[in-house]
Image: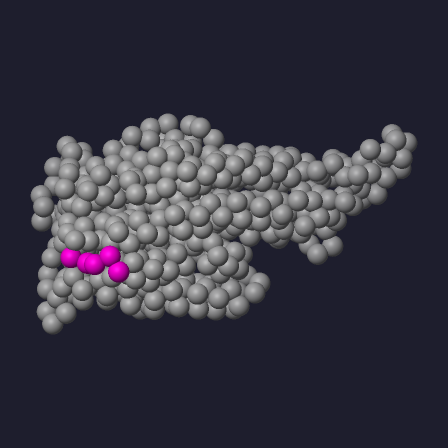
C-alpha cells in the first residue's frame, strides 16, 4: 500500500536528490546571490537560500515516504546500485526500508526547522554564508548515513558530519566553545579510526562491503572470532557517537557551548547515527559477536541511564548553579541508554523499542533545546538558580505560553503515557524482560529493573525543572510577617534588576514578586512555526504508535532473521 503511486525510477531520483541536494546547496550558498534574489541584504538572501534548500529536501522526503510501499517495509526501496571503485568492490548503493525511512524524514524535518529558526534568529558569529553552508553539509552527511548500503560509503557519510559540527560549535557557540569543539572532534575522530578498522575487517573477510548482502548472509561467512573483534572495534566507534557511558563526556560540553540549532541537530540527528549503525550493521552482520557483547552493552546502557539521571538531579538542585542546557544534555545520555538497552536485547520487541525511542528522543529533545535556547535569549542566561529565583513567578507569570510548552516537553521527555517518549522506553524494558536466546534472563531482568528505576529518576528531575523554571521558588524571607514584608516591598517596587544579568539575585535572595516584575516576550510567530510540528508529532506518535511500529517491525523481524522473513 502506498499513499501515492510513484514509479521506481522517480523514487530512485527522489532518494538521490535528498542526499545530494544539500551538498549542492552548500556550494551555492558560498556563491554571490543573483541580483534578483538578494532581498534587503546578502545575509538575508543566503538565509532564505538555506530555508529553500532544506524545505525542498523535506518536501522530497515527504513525497518519498508517501510513495513508500508500506505493505513491504522490510524490502529495500528506491534503490540505486552503481559501481564506484571496482578494485575494492565499493558501490554507490542507496536504498531505504522501514528502519531508515523515519530517520530520513526526521533529519529533513529538523534541519528545515533549524534553517527556518535561523532565518529569524541567527546565532552571533562569522559570515551567515558559512553558517548556512555548514548546516547543509551536515544535513547531506546525515541523510547519506541513513541511505547508503555500502560499508565504506557509510563510513564516509558518518565522518562527513564531524567537520561542520566542529565549526558550528567553535565559531557560533557560546562560552568555552573552542574547548568543547576540540573535545567533540577528538573523541569522535578517535572512535572513527577504530570503527574503520572493524569495517575493513568485515569487508575483507567476507569479500564484500555490501550491507544488504552481509545482512542476508547473517554472519555465516565470518568466524566467531572475527565477529567479536569487528563488534568490539565498530561498537566502540558507534558508542562514542551515541554516546554511551563512559564515552559520553564530550556531549555535555558540546551541547552547552553549541548554538541553539547546533544543539537541536546534535541531539535530534547526530546521536541517532551511532544507534542506527548498531541496528543496520552489527545486529545482522555479526550476530555471534553481538551476542558475546550484548550483556556488557546492556550493563553500560543502564549505568548510563542512572548516571545521566543522577547528574541531572545534581544540576537541578537549588544552589548548584546548574546550566539548563547542560541538564538536557545529560538527560540525552540517559535516554540513549534506553536505546542501547533495547538493541542489546537482540529481540524484535527491544529493537523496535530502540528505534521508536530514537525518533521520540529526536522530536522531544529537539523541542527542548529550542525552548531552552528561547529561554536563554530572553533571560540572558540558562543558569537554573537565576531562572528559578530571580524572576518572581518565573515563566508561568512572565511568558505563560513558553512556560506551558516547556512543561509539555518536560513531561513528554519523562515518558508520560500518551506522548512519544512512553512507547520506546516501555518496549525496551519489555524486551529486556525476555532477551534473545543465549542471553542471560536473570541478568537482563536485573537490567530491566535498573532501567525502570531510571524512569523514576527521570520523572524526578524533569518535574523539579518544571517547578523551578516555570513556577519559580519562594524566597526564604517571603515567610516574614506582613509588617516586615511591607517594609521590603518598596525596595522591590523600585524596579527589579534585569533578569539574566550578573547582578541578578539568586533564589536565596529574591524578594516577593510585585506588580513591577516585567513581562517577557512570549512565543514569537517564527518560534511557533518551528516548534508546532515537533509538538504535533510528539502527540501523534504517542497516541498512534502503530504508524511508526508498522514500518519498523517487519524490517526488524527480517533483519534479525538474516534476511529471511
Please tell me whether residue 104 is drawn above or below residue 550 in the rendered image. Answer: below
Q: Is residue 223 magenta?
A: yes
Q: Nearer the viewer, residue 251 or 283?
A: 283
Q: Quadrant of residue 479?
A: top right
Q: Residue at x 44, y 68 (%)?
A: 186
Q: Residue furthest bottom?
A: 87
Q: Residue at x 18, y 50 (%)?
A: 218
Image coordinates of residue 444 in percent, x first then y, are: 40, 40
Q: Nearer the viewer, residue 512 or 272?
A: 272
Magenta segment's dominant SS is loop
Looking at the rendered structure, the number of numbered marks drawn on it comes to 0
Where, quadrant-wise, is the C terminus in this rendering? top left
Image coordinates of residue 179 in percent, x first then y, are: 53, 68
| Residue 91 falls left or right of residue 500 | left
Image coordinates of residue 92 in percent, x first then y, are: 16, 61
| Residue 308 falls left or right of residue 225 | right
| Residue 456 falls left or right of residue 14 | right
- What colour scheme does the image use? one colour
Image coordinates of residue 197 in percent, x first then y, are: 29, 68
Q: Quadrant of residue 175?
A: bottom right
Q: Is residue 127 visible?
A: no
Where, quadrant-wise, is the N terminus in this rendering? top left
Q: Nearer the viewer, residue 458 or 374?
A: 458
Q: Nearer the viewer, residue 257 or 443?
A: 443
Please tell me whether residue 57 is drawn above or below residue 199 in the rendered image. Answer: above
Q: Is residue 456 visible?
A: yes
Q: Residue at x 67, y 52 (%)?
A: 321
Looking at the rendering, the stretch of residues picked out in magenta corresponds to 221-225
Q: Residue at x 71, y 48 (%)?
A: 319
Amino acid at each position: 500500500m502506498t499513499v501515492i503511486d510513484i514509479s521506481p525510477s522517480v523514487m530512485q531520483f527522489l532518494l538521490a536528490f535528498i542526499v545530494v541536494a544539500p551538498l549542492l546547496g552548500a556550494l551555492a550558498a558560498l556563491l554571490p546571490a543573483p541580483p534578483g534574489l538578494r532581498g534587503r541584504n546578502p545575509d538575508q538572501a543566503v538565509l532564505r537560500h538555506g530555508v529553500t534548500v532544506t524545505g525542498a529536501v523535506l518536501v522530497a522526503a515527504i513525497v518519498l515516504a508517501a510513495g513508500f510501499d508500506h505493505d513491504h517495509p522490510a524490502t529495500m526501496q528506491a534503490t540505486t546500485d552503481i559501481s564506484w571503485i571496482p578494485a575494492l568492490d565499493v558501490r554507490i548503493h542507496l536504498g531505504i526500508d522501514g528502519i531508515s525511512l523515519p530517520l530520513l524524514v526526521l533529519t529533513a524535518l529538523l534541519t528545515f526547522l533549524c534553517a527556518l529558526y535561523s532565518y529569524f534568529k541567527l546565532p552571533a558569529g562569522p559570515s551567515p554564508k558559512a553558517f548556512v553552508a555548514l548546516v547543509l553539509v551536515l544535513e547531506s552527511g546525515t541523510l547519506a548515513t541513513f541511505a547508503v548500503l555500502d560499508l565504506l560509503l557509510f563510513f564516509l557519510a558518518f565522518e562527513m558530519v564531524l567537520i561542520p559540527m566542529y565549526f558550528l560549535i567553535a565559531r557560533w557557540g557560546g562560552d568555552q566553545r573552542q574547548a568543547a569543539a576540540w573535545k567533540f572532534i577528538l573523541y569522535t575522530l578517535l572512535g572513527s579510526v577504530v570503527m574503520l578498522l572493524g569495517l575493513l575487517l568485515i569487508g575483507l573477510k567476507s569479500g564484500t562491503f555490501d550491507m544488504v548482502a552481509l545482512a542476508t548472509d547473517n554472519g555465516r561467512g565470518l568466524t566467531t572470532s572475527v565477529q567479536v573483534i569487528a563488534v568490539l572495534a565498530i561498537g566502540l566507534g558507534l558508542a562514542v557517537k551515541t554516546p554511551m557511558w563512559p564515552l559520553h563526556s564530550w556531549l555535555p560540553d558540546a551541547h552547552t557551548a553549541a548554538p541553539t540549532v547546533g544543539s537541536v541537530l546534535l541531539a535530534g540527528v547526530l546521536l541517532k547515527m551511532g544507534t542506527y549503525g548498531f541496528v543496520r550493521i552489527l545486529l545482522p552482520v555479526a550476530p555471534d559477536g553481538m551476542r558475546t557483547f550484548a550483556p556488557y552493552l546492556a550493563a553500560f546502557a543502564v549505568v548510563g541511564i542512572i548516571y545521566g539521571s543522577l547528574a541531572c538531579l545534581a544540576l537541578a538542585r537549588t544552589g548548584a548553579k546548574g546550566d539548563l542546557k547542560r541538564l538536557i544534555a545529560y538527560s540525552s545520555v540517559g535516554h540513549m541508554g534506553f536505546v542501547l538497552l533495547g538493541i542489546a536485547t537482540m529481540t524484535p520487541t527491544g529493537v523496535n523499542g530502540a528505534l521508536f525511542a530514537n525518533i521520540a528522543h529526536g522530536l522531544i529533545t529537539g523541542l527542548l533545546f529550542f525552548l531552552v535556547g528561547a529561554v536563554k535569549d530572553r533571560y540572558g542566561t540558562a543558569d537554573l538558580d537565576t531562572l528559578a529565583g530571580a524572576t518572581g513567578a518565573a515563566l508561568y507569570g512572565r511568558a505563560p505560553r513558553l512556560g506551558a510548552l516547556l512543561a509539555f516537553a518536560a513531561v513528554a521527555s519523562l515518558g508520560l503515557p500518551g506522548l512519544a517518549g512512553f512507547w520506546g522506553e516501555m518496549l525496551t524494558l519489555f524486551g529486556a524482560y525476555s532477551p534473545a536466546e543465549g542471553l542471560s534472563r536473570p541478568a537482563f531482568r536485573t537490567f530491566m529493573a535498573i532501567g525502570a528505576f531510571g524512569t523514576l529518576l527521570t520523572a524526578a528531575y524533569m518535574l523539579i525543572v518544571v517547578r523551578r523554571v516555570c513556577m519559580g521558588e519562594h524566597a526564604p524571607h517571603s515567610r516574614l510577617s506582613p509588617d516586615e514584608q511591607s517594609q521590603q516591598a518598596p525596595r522591590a517596587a523600585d524596579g527589579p534588576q534585569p533578569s539574566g544579568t550578573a547582578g541578578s539575585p539568586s533564589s536565596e535572595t529574591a524578594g516577593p514578586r510585585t506588580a513591577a516584575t516585567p513581562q517577557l516576550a512570549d512565543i514569537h510567530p517564527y518560534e511557533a512555526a518551528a516548534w508546532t510540528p515537533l509538538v504535533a508529532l510528539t502527540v501523534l506518535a504517542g497516541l498512534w504508535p502503530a504508524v511508526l511500529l508498522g514500518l519498523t517491525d517487519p524490517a526488524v523481524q527480517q533483519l534479525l532473521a538474516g534476511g529471511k522473513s
